[in-house]
Each structure stands twice: as C-alpha cells, then as structure tokens.
C-alpha cells in the first residue's frame, strides 16, 4: 500500500506523530498543509523538528488545495473575529491517488473543530488505517 496521509490543522501534534507509531514509517510521506505561506510552514517544520522524517509541511497561501478539497471555512463566526481564509480541520488517507478515508472536525457551533477535534486526531486516523 502506498498510503499517504494528508492533514490540515491549526495545531498539529507533530512530536506525537514522530515519536509514536501513529505514522507508519513504511509510507512514502505525510503532508501537513495549512493556508499559510511557505516561510511560515518552513519555520513551523523547523520548530517541530520534522527534518529527516517522512513528514512534509506544505503552505497553501492562496488556499488552492483547500478550495479544491472543498475545505475552505466559510462559516461567519471565525470571519467575524478576523480569521479569514482558513481551512477546515481535516485528515485524509490516500492510497495510490485514491481517497480511502476522510474526516472533518466541525460542528454548527464549532466550525473550526477546536472543541472536538477527535475525528481528525491521531487515534482516529490510526484506527482508520487499521481498517484499510
């Protein structure tokens, strides 16, 4: 299986991903994208010590990937406090170019998924991987 994991979070527990069996090291790479520019993502990657791992951070400053995935957060709540152009919190498992599993952490009262991100956190992804 050529599984690749794609995540979009505001805060990702990268150290958890690196130090636990959450991410199988037999997979080619795991991409974490955010609606931020490359410089921000590079600095974040350095801070999270991902160099030498199979984790890749990707900036999506124009939200092109976010929009193609239909993950643009359009709820008026975050925009009303200046959070504009953010992607929804989600996780995707892709195998050989085919989406095998997809989860979004959001609710009508919690469009960012901050109160209950469990559907897109490591244990949920790990459980999904077991089923593939």
Image (spheres, rainbow, N blue to C red):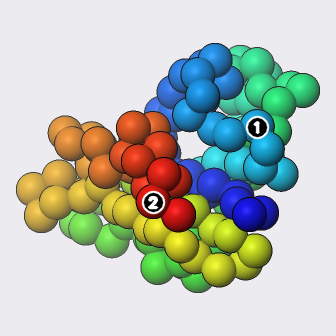
The answer to whether residue 75 shows anywhere in this view is: yes
Q: How far across and how far down the image is residue 66, in percent?
A: 56, 70
- Crowd tier of the residue under label 1, counting other residues whose Cα lies within 10 Å: few below 14, some 14–19, many 20 or above: few
Q: Quadrant of residue 61?
A: bottom right
- Residue located farthest toward the front when viewing the structure as drawn: 131
Where, quadrant-wise, is the N terminus in this rendering? bottom right
| Residue identified by numbered label 1 | 25
The circle on residue 1 is none
Q: Residue at x 52, y 53 (%)?
A: 129
- Nearest to viewer (mark 1 / mark 2): 2
Q: Is residue 52 left or right of residue 83?
A: right
Q: How far across and how far down the image is residue 49, in percent?
A: 76, 19
Q: Residue at x 12, y 64 (%)?
A: 108
Secondary element under disc 1, as helix, strand or loop, is loop
Q: How far across and how far down the image is residue 59, in percent?
A: 72, 52
- Count the marks: how many? 2
Q: Residue at x 35, y 61 (%)?
A: 104
Secondary element under disc 2, as helix, strand or loop, is loop
Q: How far across and how far down the image is residue 58, in percent?
A: 74, 51
User: Between residues 126 and 107, which one lies in front from this camera angle?
Assistant: 126
- Crowd tier of the residue under label 2, counting other residues whose Cα lies within 10 Å: few below 14, some 14–19, many 20 or above: few
The answer to whether residue 91 shows anywhere in this view is: no
Q: CA distance from mark 1 to mark 2?
A: 18 Å
The circle on residue 131 is 2
């Amino acid at each position: 299986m050529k599984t690749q994991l794609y995540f979009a979070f505001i805060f990702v527990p990268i150290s958890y991903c690196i130090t636990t069996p959450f991410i199988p090291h037999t997979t080619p790479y795991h991409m974490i994208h955010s609606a931020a520019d490359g410089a921000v993502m590079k600095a974040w990657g350095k801070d999270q010590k991902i160099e030498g791992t199979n984790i890749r951070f990707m900036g999506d400053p124009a939200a092109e990937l976010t929009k193609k995935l239909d993950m643009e957060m359009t709820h008026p709540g975050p925009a009303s406090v200046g959070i504009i152009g953010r992607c929804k919190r989600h996780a995707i498992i892709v195998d050989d170019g085919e989406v095998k599993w997809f989860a979004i952490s959001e609710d009508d009262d919690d469009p960012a998924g901050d109160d209950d991100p469990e559907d897109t956190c490591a244990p949920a992804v790990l459980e999904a991987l077991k089923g593939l």
